[in-house]
Amino acid sequence: MLSFVYRSPIVRHDYADPYLAGVGLGVVLLAAFAITGHGLGASGAFGTTAAGTVAAIAPRYASGNPYFARYLQSPGGPWRAWLLFEVAGMCAGGFVSAAMAGRLRREVERGAGVSARSRLATAAGGGAIMGLGAVLARGCTSGLALTGGALLSVGSWAFMLCAFASAYGVAPMLKRSWR
Amino acid sequence: MSDLVIAVAIGLAFGFAIERAGLGSARKLTGQFFLTDLTVFKVMFTAIVTAMLGTFWLGRLGILDLALLSIPDTYLGAQVAGGLIFGAGFALAGLCPGTSCVAAASGRLDGAAVAGGLFAGVLVTGLFFAPLQRFYESGAHGAWTLPQLLDLPYGIVVFGVVVVALAGFVAAERIEART
C-alpha cells in the first residue's frame, strides 16, 4: 500500500497497479460527493477560462452569449469557479506524483516514426475536437463519464459508450503513428 | 474561500491518482484503443465501481443523503453526438481534458498541446454557440438514472454494474495476456 504513495525518486518507477489506482481514484470521487455534493470535472475549467477571457476582451458580447453567460453569472464570476481551482490542484497533484516517482521529464511523447511537430499538431487538433464534443455533451471523461457513471446517470453512460465506440472506430487509422 | 481550498485539495488527490495510474501518458491511454494496454478501462471502472458502491452503502446506512447529490443531467441527443465527437478527438489527442493537464504538469509538451487545443475548441464552440443551442437543449430528461430507465431497484443496478465490471476485468486480463 505504501508503494502506491511513495517510491524513491532516484530511479524512474513503474506505474501503480491499475486496480489499486482505480480504488484510490474512486475514493477521491466518493470524497468529492460527500464533501461537495457534486463530483469531479475538467472540461468545465476550460469553459470558465474561455468565458473569462472573452468577457475580458468583449464584456457586453460575452454576457449576451448564452454559453459564456452561464459561467459569468456563477457566484464569484468565471475566475472563482470551483472547477478552475480543482484543475489547478490536479496539475499540482500530477506534478507531485511524477516528481516522487522520478517521472518528471520534458518530452513530446510520440511514436517512433512521428516528428515532434506532427505529434503536437495532432494533439492540439484532437484537443480542439474534444472541446467541441465536451461543450455539446456538457462534460468530459471526468465530469460526465466518471462522476455520472458512479451516480448511474443515463446521459453519462450514453456519453461514455459513444466516446469509446468512436475512439475504437478512429484508432485503427492511428495505429501506425504510435509504433 | 474554504470551498476553493477544498477544490484544490480534491484536485490534488485526483491528479495524484491519475499520474500514479500512468494516465498522464498518451502512449498508455492509446493502448486502450489498440487493445495492447487496458489500464484506462481498469482504472476507470474500478473507480466507478468504488465510488458507486461507496455512494450506495453510505446512502443505505444513512451517512450520506443521496438527495443532496447532483446527478449530471441527461440531454440524450447532445450527449450521444458529443460523445461520438469527443471519442474521435480523444483517440487523436491520446489524452482527455483531465489527463492532458496531468501530462503537461509532468513535463509532457503534447499534454500542453492537447490542453491548448481544448481551450481553442471550447472557445470557438462558445463563439458559434447560437446555431447549436437548440440541439444542445434537445432531449432533456433532467437527472435521469439507469434504475429509472430500466425500472429496477437501485441496489440491483449497482449489483449489475459490479458483475459487468468484474467480467470486463477478466476479459481485459485475457486480452492483455494475448498480446
Image: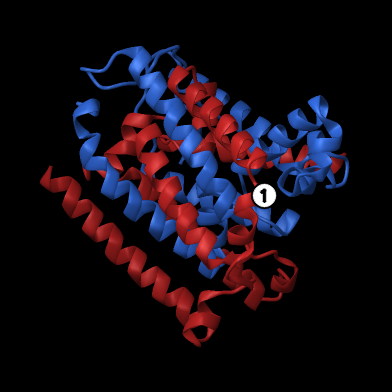
Q: Residue at x 67, y 42 (%)?
A: B10
Who is closer to the viewer here, A94 or A162?
Answer: A162
Q: Residue at x 36, y 35 (%)?
A: B92
The residue under label 1 is which amino acid type? Ala
Asked if B169 appears above or below B94 in the picture, the reply is: below
Q: Is residue A113 left or right of residue A54?
A: left
Q: Is residue A19 left or right of residue A139?
A: left
Q: Quadrant of the N terminus of chain B?
A: top right
Task: Say whether residue B12 is visible.
Answer: no
Asked if B151 appears above or below A148 in the picture, the reply is: below
Q: How many marks?
A: 1
Asked if B154 appears above or below A74 in the picture, the reply is: below
Residue A133: image location, x then y, percent: 51, 47
Badge 1 density bin: few <14, some 14–19, many ≥20, Cα 10 Å = few
Q: Colour of chain B?
A: red
* Structure colour scheme: by chain
Residue A120: image location, x then y, percent: 41, 19
Task: Say whether residue A79 is visible.
Answer: yes
Who is closer to the viewer here, B75 or A161?
Answer: B75
Residue B100: image location, x then y, percent: 50, 31
Q: Residue at x 39, y 16 (%)?
A: A108
**Quadrant in the rendering for residue A52:** top right
Rendered blue, the chain in question is: A
Residue A6: image location, x then y, percent: 49, 29
Q: Circle 1 sits in a helix, a strand or a loop, which is it?
A: helix
**Quadrant in the rendering for residue A91:** top right
Residue lying furthest front in this view? B131
Asked if B134 appears above or below A76 in the picture, the reply is: below
Q: Which residue is mark 1?
A: B130
Q: Quadrant of the C terminus of chain B?
A: top left
Q: Residue at x 75, y 28 (%)?
A: A53
